[in-house]
Image (cartoon, rainbow, N blue to C red):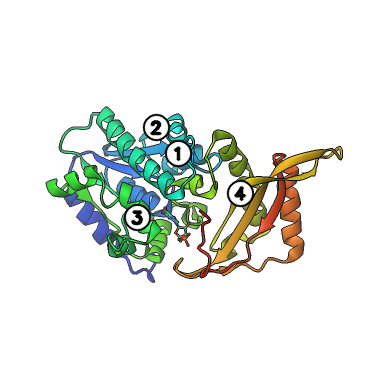
Amino acid sequence: MNDNMNVNIEEMRKTLAAKAGENPVLLLISGGVDSTVTGALLLKTLKNEQVHLLYMDTGLMRKDETSYVKAVMQNLGAKNIHIVHCEDEFLAALTGVTDPEEKRRIIGDLFISIQEREVARLGLPAGYFLAQGTIYPDLTESGKGDGKAAFIKSHHNVASPLVAQKREEGRLIEPLQSLYKDDVRDLGKALGIDSAAINRHPFPGPGIAVRILGEVTKEKCDILREADAVFISELKSRGLYDKIWQAFPVLLPLRSVGLDSGGARKYGWVLALRAINSTDAVTANVYPFDMAVLLEISAKITGTVKEIGRVTYDISNKPPATIEWE
Ligand code: XMP
């Protein structure tokens, strides 16, 4: 164990084991650091058969996310991983919707209803425990109203009816609730989680739906996913990923004229790249790429994702801009 850690793992494991006993424990996982570390703690403390992980593939995730999440959890010893494929349901519900708050509301509501349906389908005995990766800032921020992260987390963490019910029954397990993000990362490392999974950039709960301005369609999700995969892999191969707090592309709701490789006119989508540094997401500074690097990344994206005709770089700090575009 790391002596510098603010976390007493043995104490956490003891408390968890005493609370859960032999009962099944269900954890909803998202691929984010908090739920991954919570999963690792459950798997390293309880019997692997006792731990049930539920993951919803909303179709709004990054490229190959579902198999990635599955592999990370299997490496930690997970036996019961329940993957719910609900892309069609999410895309159908988002058809024709362009207002960002409306998108968030639809996604949040659907998240909860599918979650309840799928949890019921698992048929766990009534005494099962629900675990979630709530961390200290989630608790202090929820209810304050305008923090978007708090708002969206609230729909699958703090305030869903399932959580409320389990809290009332005394069957809610929140092992990270007194920890800050850095402690969670230290704990994750000590529990043997792959460092790439621990050091992932933050990703919003409603997924790439908030990074597609205008209507969300399967075609646009696929374009954005491909562009994201190229951008992130370029950052990793250049050793820049870990120097940046958060980086992602945004698909704008417009196309502009350009030329295809044969010189004919084509209308390609416009993509904005965002890369920022921050400590707490409350303020953020644009990452100052070398121009040569940006040009190479842009060329790689337009060369790989043919539907994209033009790439721009967002040079606005927060404030006045936000980190995400919506
Ligand atoms: P903004 O765009 O408000 O983002 O500057 C601040 C941080 O919060 C993340 N973010 C979210 N995280 N659910 C989340 O879990 C969300 O709905 C959500 N919206 C924004 C954003 O990626 C950034 O790190």
Would you name the residue on which mark 2 appears? 84
Tag 4 secondary structure: strand
Q: Which amino acid type is shown beneath numbered disc 3?
A: Phe
Cα–Cα gap, marks 1 and 3: 27 Å
Q: Where on the image, by quarter, is ligand 1? A: bottom left
- What kind of element bears circle 3? helix
**Residues at marks 3 and 2, CA–CA distance in whole angstroms:** 23 Å
Identify whether 212 is placed above or below 275.
Answer: above
Q: Is mark 3 within 8 Å of ligand 1?
A: yes
Mark 2 or 1, nearer chain start: 1
Instruction: Identify the image quadrant of residue 8.
Output: bottom left
The type of residue carrying mark 4 is Leu
Q: Which residue is mark 1?
A: 70
Q: What residue type is disc 1 on?
A: Lys
Q: State the mark number for residue 252.
A: 4
CA gap, disc 2 to disc 4? Answer: 29 Å
Depth-wise, is mark 1 or mark 4 nearer the camera? 4
* 219 left or right, relative to 198: right
> For disc 2, does the CB lie below 8 Å from ligand 1?
no
| SS of the residue under disc 2 | strand
For discs 2 and 4, the disc positioned in front in the rendered view: 4
The image position of residue 247, as x and y in percent, is: 57, 57
